[in-house]
Image: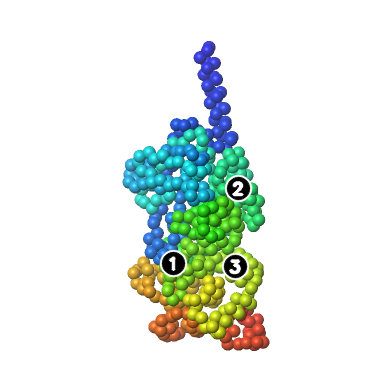
Amino acid sequence: MKNKKGYALFIAILLMTVIGVVFTGSLKVNASTTMEKKVYTLEYPTWLRVQGLTKGIDHDRQDLGIIVPKDSTIEIRQTNPNYKGTVKVELLNNDRSKENAYQVGSSWVTATAIADSAVFAKTTFTAEAPTLEYKVDDKVTELPIFKQGDKEADFFEKWDKSNAAFALIGNKYIQIFVPARDKSYLKKMDDFSSINDLLAYYDTLFETYNELEGISFTTDTATDKNVPTKYFAKANIQGGGAGYYGEDHTAESSSSVAGFWLRPGWGGLHEIGHGYQGGFIYDSTFSASEVWNNIFADSMQKKTLGNDYYTEGWLYRGERPFLENLFEKLSYETKTPAGNWDLRSKLYMLTLMKDKAGDKAFAHFNQSYRAAVNEGTINFEEKLLDLMTKAYGETSHYDFTPFAELVHGSMTDSQKVENLYAGNKVVYPLASLLSGNNLKQARKDISLDTKWG
C-alpha cells in the first residue's frame, strides 16, 4: 500500500511538471536535457557571387529555438558522421561586442553567453546536412518564433508568458531578430496592421528587387536562378551610422529594430538593396557605390507610395524643382562630369535612364552582365555607361548615348559607334529641346512627371 501511494505521488508530480512546461510558454528542462536539430543545407550560388551579388547569401542561419541567459552555457556538437566539416554556431543579441561564435565539430564545445543571447547555426552550402546535438539546463528560455501565416495572438501569448529577451519573425525572404524592447511596438505598429501585414510588405519588396535583378526561382536560365537564402536583420548598438549591410547580416545601429525593420522606411530599403549590387558599381570613371542600391529602393517607393512618391519618397522629398535645377546646373553650367556628381544627383540621373528604358531593360542589364561574368567574356575595365547603354538599347531600342554625353558621362568611342549603328531611337531630355510655354504644353501632352524626363 505504501509503494502504491509513493507511485501515485510520483505520477502527480510528473503531471504537474508537464503542465508547467506546456502552459508557461517557457522551455523548462533539467540539467541533463539533450536536444537535436538537423540543419538544412542550400546550393551555393556561385553564378551570383562571381557577379558581385551578395543578396543575403551568407545571412542565412537557423535558430536552435533557445535563448541562453547571461553567463550561462550550453554544450553542443555535430553528430552526423557523414558530415565532415564544422558548423558555425552563434550566440546573438543586439550588441555585437557581446556576441560569441564557435566552430562546432564532432567534439563537445561549451558556448558561453556574455549577454542574454539566442542560439543560431549558420547554414552550410554542402551536400550533406549536419545534425547538431546540444545540452541545455533549466535556465534557458524558448525563443518565440513567428512564421508568416501564424496566429499573432498565440505568438504574443507565448512571448508574454516567457518574457524572453528576443523573438524571431520572418518569411521565406527575411528573418528579423526582435529585441524585447520592441514587443509593444510590434503589437501595434504605425504602418502595418499585423506581423503578417509587415511580412507581406517584405514579400513585395523582395519580389520587386528580384524582378529588377532578373532572377527567379523558376527560370530555365542557369545564371538567373534565385536561391532561397534569407536576409537576417537585427539590431546592433555598436553599429556605425544609422544602419549597415554586411555579408553576415544587416542591422539598425541601435538597440531596437523598429526604425529600420518594422517600418517601410528608406533605411531598410537602402540596406537590403546593397545585396543586389554588382561589381560594375566600382567603375573608376563613374562610381555607383551607395547609388545602385538606391535604384532598387526608389523603385519600391515608387510602387508603394503612389501619388505621394514625389513628396514622401527619398529621391524627391517634395523638392522636385531643386533637383531639376541642380541637374541643369551640373549639365549645362558647371559641366561637371557625372562621375563627380553627388549621390542624390547620380540617382536622379540613373533613375531617369531606367524609367525611360523600363524595368525589363534594367533587368536585362543585370542578366547580361551576370551571364558575361560567368562566361568569362566580361572586361572588368569596361565603363558602366558603356554596359548600360548597350543593354538598355537591346531591350528598349532607345539610344542613350546623347543623354550620357549631356551629363558628361564617361563612354568609349567604340560603344558610342556601336549604339549609333544599332539603329535605335535617340532619347534626349525634352527640356533640352523646348522651353517656356512650349515645354509646359509638351509635358502635358506626353505626361512627363519631371522636367528632364
For mark 2, what is the residue?
A: 181
Q: Is 207 located above or below residue 178 in the figure?
A: below
At label 1, which amino acid type do we have?
Gly
Give residue 247's position: percent from left, percent from top: 45, 58
Determine which of the numbered discs, if any, sits on residue 278 in the image. 1
**Element at label 1:** loop
For mark 3, what is the residue?
A: 314
Alpha-carbon neighbours of circle 3 within 10 Å: few (<14), some, or many (≥20)? some
Closer to viewer: mark 2 or mark 1: 2
**Is residue 200 at all visible to an observer of this figure?**
no
Quarter of the image where the C terminus is located: bottom right
At label 3, which amino acid type do we have?
Trp
Q: Which residue occupies 63% across, 77% down?
A: 321
Closer to viewer: mark 3 or mark 1: 3
At label 2, which amino acid type do we have?
Arg
Residue that protrudes farthest toward the top in the picture: 1
Give residue 55's position: percent from left, percent from top: 46, 60
Q: In front: 288, or 329?
A: 329
Q: Quadrant of residue 441?
A: bottom right
Q: Is residue 131 left or right of residue 29?
A: left
Q: Quadrant of residue 434?
A: bottom right
Q: In front: 10, or 341?
A: 341
Query: What colouring does the structure picture have?
Result: rainbow
